[in-house]
Image (cartoon, rainbow, N blue to C red):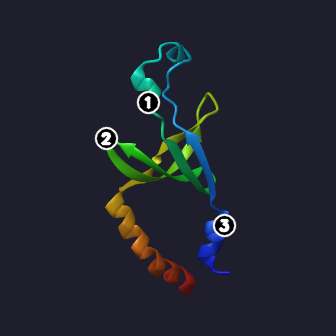
Amino acid sequence: MSESSNSEESAKVTTSAKRSGKGDSSKAKKSKVAETKKEPEELKFEIGEKRFVTINEYKGRVRVDIREFYSAADGEMKPGRKGISLDADQFRALVKCIPKLEQQLKNR
């Protein structure tokens, strides 16, 4: 088994619906927009202790985040300041580099 397949197997995948941050009172005031608009599921890959890769949208642009998370006072895991956010082109460039990076790791 190769090192890359081991790392793929060790990554945990979770999904969760994004929360609006509003209380339950928003359910009582349903509008046509709220009924048709569906919150996207967030795909989250755990790559280490409290480290995740997520895909999200920021200022209308899709981003791939590799970031440390922390436990907030309410017990919810939230993204921290340590990490990197890549646009789609930067992520694709990183993916192209991975075979060379794996080779360098094997040689060390």
Residue for badge 3:
9
Give left or right: position of 29 versus 12: left
Residue for badge 1:
36
Element type where label 1 sits in the image: helix
Residue at point 61%, 67% (across, down): 8
Q: Position of residue 78 (x, y in %)?
A: 54, 38
Q: Earlier in the sequence, mark 3 or mark 1?
A: 3
Determine whether 88 is above or below 43 in the image.
below
Q: Earlier in the sequence, mark 1 or mark 2?
A: 1
Element type where label 2 sits in the image: loop
Cα separation, mark 3 vs mark 1, equals: 37 Å
Q: Position of residue 66 (x, y in %)?
A: 48, 54
> In this view of the protein, which residue sits in the foreground, 16 or 27?
27
Residue for badge 2:
59
Residue at point 55%, 45% (across, down): 69
The amino acid type found where label 3 is placed reads: Glu
The amino acid type found where label 1 is placed reads: Thr
Question: From the viewer's perspective, is the residue at label 1 or at label 2 nearer?
Answer: 1
Cα separation, mark 1 vs mark 2, equals: 22 Å
Determine whether 10 is above or below 43 in the image.
below
Tag 2 and tag 3, C-beta contact below 8 Å: no
Element type where label 3 sits in the image: helix
The amino acid type found where label 2 is placed reads: Lys
Q: Position of residue 38 (x, y in %)?
A: 47, 34
Residue at point 52%, 13% (across, down): 28
Q: Earlier in the sequence, mark 2 or mark 3?
A: 3
Determine whether 72 is above or below 26 in the image.
below
Residue 48, image quadrant:
bottom right
**Quadrant including the N terminus:** bottom right
Cα separation, mark 2 vs mark 3, equals: 33 Å
